Amino acid sequence: QVQLVESGGGSVQPGGSLRLSCAASRYTYSTYCMGWFRQVSGKEREGVAAIYSGGGVTYYADSVKGRFTISLDQGNAKNTLYLQMNSLKPEDTAMYFCAADHTVEPYYCRSGSWSQAPPGYHFPNWGQGTRVTVSS
């Protein structure tokens, strides 16, 4: 059973930074797409960034380009996904989730088209989320 555990959320002022982490254990696939999503209560979940295993392929939503950086540490028995968030804005306030899907191909991971698919169509494995609040 795959386990994804997010951490690193918190409260910051506008312009501040946070680094989210997602520890993936018991994920036995050697190739996969991992992504960060966020959701505000009452709204649909939004795909924020994604990265393909190996790290050479990434996707960013327009709303976070130039401010967020996704990275993946593939070491030992546990892979760790990161999201470095800089220049945070109040509109970045949300619950952030990480997710993984071994069926998503590299070109599809990079395209971000998966973010338009019906909920549950991709990324069957999810963490419990970590809350980010940006407020003065």
Image (cartoon, rainbow, N blue to C red):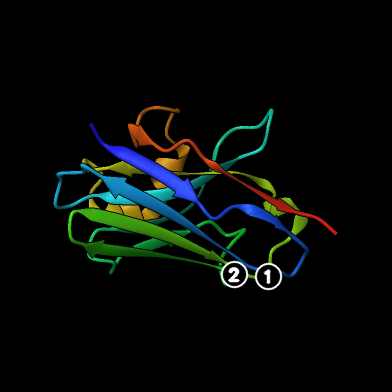
Residue 82 x %, y %: 43, 61
User: Which SS class for mark 2?
Assistant: loop
Image location (x, y in percent) of residue 27: 21, 43
Identify the residue shown where x is 74% and y is 70%. Answer: 15
Residues at discs 2 and 1 in contact (Cβ within 8 Å): yes
For the C terminus, the quadrant is bottom right
Which residue has dot 1 on it?
Answer: 87
For marks 2 and 1 on the same chain, the one whose residue lies earlier in the sequence: 2
Q: Say which element carries label 1.
A: loop
Compared to 55, does 92 lie above or below? above
Indicate which disc residue 20 carries: none
Question: Does 123 sit left or right of 68 as displayed?
Answer: left
Crowding around mark 1 (Cα neighbors within 10 Å: few <14, some 14 to 19, many 20+) is some
Crowd tier of the residue under label 2, counting other residues whose Cα lies within 10 Å: few below 14, some 14–19, many 20 or above: some
Question: In percent of the image, x 18 and y 60: which residue is there?
Answer: 76
Side of 19 where 29 appears, left or right: left
Numbered badge on residue 67: 2
Amino acid type at circle 2 is Arg
- In the drawing, does residue 67 fall left or right of residue 33? right
Amino acid on which the number 1 mark rests in the picture: Ser
Measuring 59% from the left and 52% from the top, which residue is drawn there?
A: 9
Q: Is residue 26 above or below residue 35?
A: above
Mark 2 to mark 1: distance in Å?
A: 6 Å
Give percent across and percent down for residue 45: 55, 36
Between 38 and 1, the one lying in front of the other is 1
